Image (cartoon, rainbow, N blue to C red):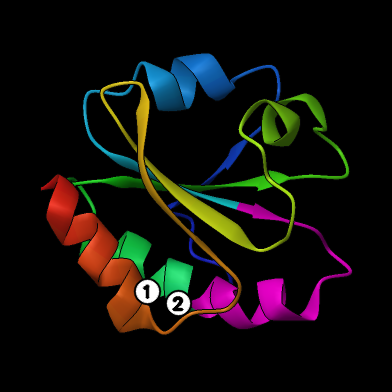
Amino acid sequence: MASEKVLVFGDTNFEAEVLKSNVPVLVDFWASWCAPCKAVSPLLDAIAEEYDGKIRVGKVNVDDNPATPSKYGVRGIPTIILFKDGKEMDRVVGAVPKAQLEDLIKKAL
């Protein structure tokens, strides 16, 4: 079951919700047909719960929102990008272990 703490971002709200956030934001660029994206989803749910209040976690469906992934050069999915102060801090591509995602987050906190 998806966590209610994982937000939904898109082309229309990306700037307000991610770039103008006062806390770091972990963004998962994904698609419903992508098996590795489905594998990463429970990890993001857990991270959203564990780091609630310290970071925000959200997803951008690349099929429904083509402009944002294009702007950030997302070529493969899942691509998970960490934003802080309106800028990209780091990214990982592919299904990665939770520990690798937590290493990204620790750099931003």
Left or right of 14: which side holds 49?
A: left
Label 2 Cα crowd, 10 Å radius (few <14 / some 14-19 / many 20+): some
What residue is rendered at 32% in x and 76% in y? 100
Location of residue 31 (image quadrant): bottom right
Q: Viewer-proximal residue, 40 or 88?
A: 88
- Closer to the camera in the image, 24 or 73: 73
Examine the rendered structure and indicate whether residue 35 appears above or below residue 91: below
Query: What residue did someone put label 1 on?
Result: 46
**Cβ atoms at labels 1 and 2 below 8 Å apart:** yes
Q: Is residue 38 above or below residue 71?
A: below
Helix, strand or loop under label 1: helix
Amino acid bearing label 1: Ala
Residue 1 is situated, as x and y percent measured from the top left of the image, at 59, 76
Q: Position of residue 91 (x, y in %)?
A: 44, 53
Query: From the viewer's perspective, is residue 106 above or below residue 21?
Result: below
Residue 80 part of the magenta-drawn span: no
Magenta-colored span: 29-42
Tell me if 78 is positioned left or right of 16 in this view. right
Mark number, residue 25: none
Residue on which the image places disc 2 = 43
Where is residue 78, by image quadrant?
bottom right
* Closer to the camera in the image, 107 or 9: 107
Q: Residue at x 25, y 46 (%)?
A: 55
SS at badge 2: helix
Q: Amino acid at mark 2?
A: Leu
Q: Residue at x 56, y 76 (%)?
A: 40
User: In 3D space, how far apart are the residues under numbered discs 1 and 2 (Cα atoms)?
Assistant: 5 Å
Left or right: 44 in relation to 28: left
Q: Residue at image x 78%, y 80%?
A: 35
Percent x, y of residue 10: 68, 30
Query: Is residue 52 toward the left or the right of residue 6 in the image?
Result: left
In the image, residue 94 sits, relative to residue 67, either above or below, namely below
